[in-house]
Amino acid sequence: MVTLIEDDDQIRRALRTALEELGYAVRTAASATQALQQVAADAGDVVVLDLGLPDLEGQDLLKVLRAMSPVPVIVTTARDDEAEIVRTLDSGADDYVVKPFSAAQLDARIRAVLRRARTHDEQAAISIGELEIDLGNRRATLAGKELDLTRKEFDLLQYLARRRGSVVTKRELLAEVWHQPFGGEDRTLDVHLSWLRRKLGETAAQPRYLRVVRGVGAQLVDPSAQR
């Protein structure tokens, strides 16, 4: 999920359209207040932040975002002097793009910061209830029993686990897990979700960890927190 924070309506709409065409799930905010509400609810995968906001100086918002979450932040602005760039990076930005820029350039920057973020935690483990996912060794266990997952099933499980609690769209899953940025076959995803559900010992009628939102996507939840 890309959180796009931009107060200019025309730029915001154009960037959202371009990023969605590249396969990203995008939510937008036109103010710092709206952006903070979104990030507090779900940090997403990366924030694209315009410094020129109407209700809060972008540098101050950057500091607040960095205090709230380790989510990567790419700053976009027309300010191109070296002192400003250094100050922005020192304030916690992961990258800096000077306007005007193309969607292709922003796409490359997003992919770069996401690669770095994944490298940082690639040896980590994710725990959701009795489900343990060892990212470094690519192993998953449920209640201490190892799950026999294919490579793609593990990729799907770990991507959903990183976004635990959030509904991840089919388009995003196809882009990030199957690397099909312009969409792909929903049937492929549906089949893998069905296989993964079965290996988790669940059924569509009685889901526990894996919830599918028909026509939208899927989410991974802690069943003990749903009671």
Image: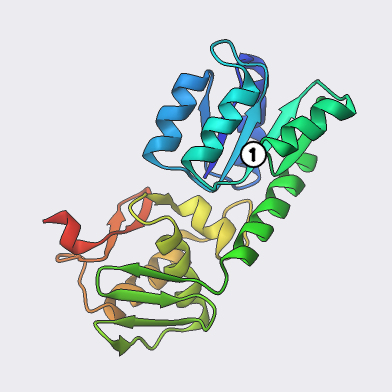
User: Where's the C terminus, which quadrant?
Assistant: bottom left
Between 194 and 208, the one lying in front of the other is 208
Image quadrant in which you'd find residue 10: top right
87 or 74: nearer the viewer: 87
Q: Which residue is mark 1?
A: 19
Amino acid type at circle 1 is: Leu
- In this picture, residue 131 sits left or right of residue 158: left
Q: Residue 157 placed where, x, y %?
A: 42, 69
Left or right for 166, reference 115: left
- Relative vertical location of residue 129 with respect to residue 169 in this rendering, above or below: below
Q: Residue at x 46, y 43 (%)?
A: 43
Q: Residue furthest left?
A: 227
Residue at the image point whose x is 20% and y is 71% from the top: 203
- Front residue of 222/171: it is 222
Provide the secondary structure element on which disc 1 rests: helix
Identify whether 183 is placed above or below 77. Answer: below
Count residues near mark 1 (Cα–Cα under 10 Å), then give few for <14, some for 14-19, many for 20+: some
User: 26 or 205: nearer the eye?
Assistant: 26
